[in-house]
Image (cartoon, rainbow, N blue to C red):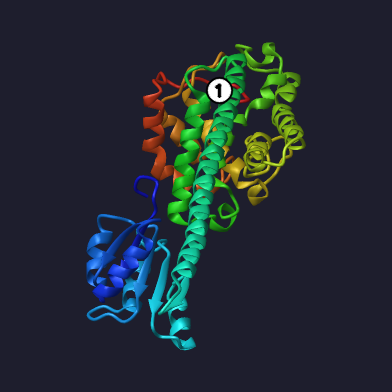
Amino acid sequence: MKNGRQIIFLVDDNITNLTAGKNMLKDHYDVFPIPSGTKLFSILEKVKPDLILLDVEMPEMNGYEAIKKIKEEEDTRDIPVIFLTARNDSGSELEGLSLGAIDYIFKPFSPPLLLKRLENHLLIRSQQIALRNYNDNLQQMVTKRTRQVVELQNAILSTVTEMVEFRDDVTGGHIERTQNYLKLLVDKLLWEKIYGEEISSWNLEFLVPSAQLHDVGKIAISDTILNKPGKLTAEEFETMKRHPSIGETAIENIMKTTSENDFLHHARIFAGTHHEKWDGSGYPRGLKGHGIPLQGRLMAIADVYDALISARPYKQPMNPRDAGQIIIEGSGKHFDPVLVDLFRDLAPQFALIAEYWNVTVEEPDELKETA
């Protein structure tokens, strides 16, 4: 649109028709008289009209050939096209409309009628553009709002997980490291096409971030137990073993208040099953083998590996090589053998993550029972 006026391309090989058409329309629109279909496309490279009036009978490239090309190009396909023709048979009209024309006007035509039909079609065109712009703006608003909600969610999650780490006297990024280990394992599963049926039901966008809440149940465990420098008593260990169930219940209660549960669905499983063991000796339910959800089997490797390489009140950190060997030796006992086979290939990358987070590497010490 130039100076508030809409642009009309009038395409006709007859100079008399071009002149008459321009004179008829020039008081209402900016009219570009174009003598051929070939010339039309050279001008379309520089100017995009609001509507094209296209003659059917032209040499070199007729109107039907021209509209096919218009509709094939992404930057011109939405320009409305009206055929102007002396053909008044229904077959020709049907062909033109089938090719994407919005109207078919027969020559000779009444100038007032032509102007009114142009006015109506251009009004529809303007409304379509306005609606598309509105939808684009609305989508941008939704995207912005969604991003704000996600940022708020991540900020809350970060605060909660930091509180858990602080109470557990764990420093140095346990949550971040376990998420990175988990992503390595999941990416490897996808690459190797292992457990594909189970993974296909997951929303992978939420999977790894939801693992932040795997230890949220520790908020309800006493500091004297969490930070005890020595081995736990049998009674204290039973109390510690409650944290997966506590975390699972807390997340379930949140799920009852919202319909958006994909994120929380994974978080609940991570929280409730990451201490289950492949041989059934884990807690809180003593699940065994494939009865343990895959999320829990994955987190078991990530969580134990990080516990081994990290300093805790009750132990010195273990070096990544020895930690990796313990994971491998736990195949079929603590851990899913299939996942351990994947871990063998990924062990150097696990060690790089630990090194990136400046985890201190010292000689191994006796682990606390809950490690």
Q: Is residue 330 visible?
A: no
Say above or below: 352 vs 39: above
Is residue 190 at least partly visible in the picture?
Answer: yes
Q: Which residue is mark 1?
A: 367
Residue at position x 52%, y 58% in the image: 124
Res. 86 image quadrant: bottom left
Residue 320 at x, y percent in the picture: 41, 29
User: Which amino acid type corresponds to the residue marked 1 in the rendered image?
Assistant: Leu
Please state the horizontal and vertical placement of residue 194, each as a whole percent of the image: 50, 55
> Mark 1 falls on what kind of element?
loop
Judge the density around disc 1: few (<14), some (14-19), many (≥20) Cα neighbours within 10 Å.
some
Seen in the image, is 56 located left or right of residue 174?
Answer: left
Q: Position of residue 173 (x, y in %)?
A: 48, 22
Q: Residue 164: x, y in percent?
A: 62, 20
Question: For residue 281, what is the image quadrant?
Answer: top right
218 sits left or right of 91 in the view = right
Tell me if residue 232 comes above or below residue 328 in the rendering.
above
Q: Nearer the viewer, residue 207 or 74?
A: 74
Task: Pick whichever, 79 or 296, lies toward us.
Answer: 79
Query: Residue 34 or 363: which is nearer the viewer?
Result: 34
Q: Residue at x 50, y 51 (%)?
A: 132
Q: Is residue 53 left or right of residue 200?
A: left
User: How many callouts does the rendering have?
Assistant: 1
Quadrant (top left, top right, bottom left, bottom right) of the C terminus: top right
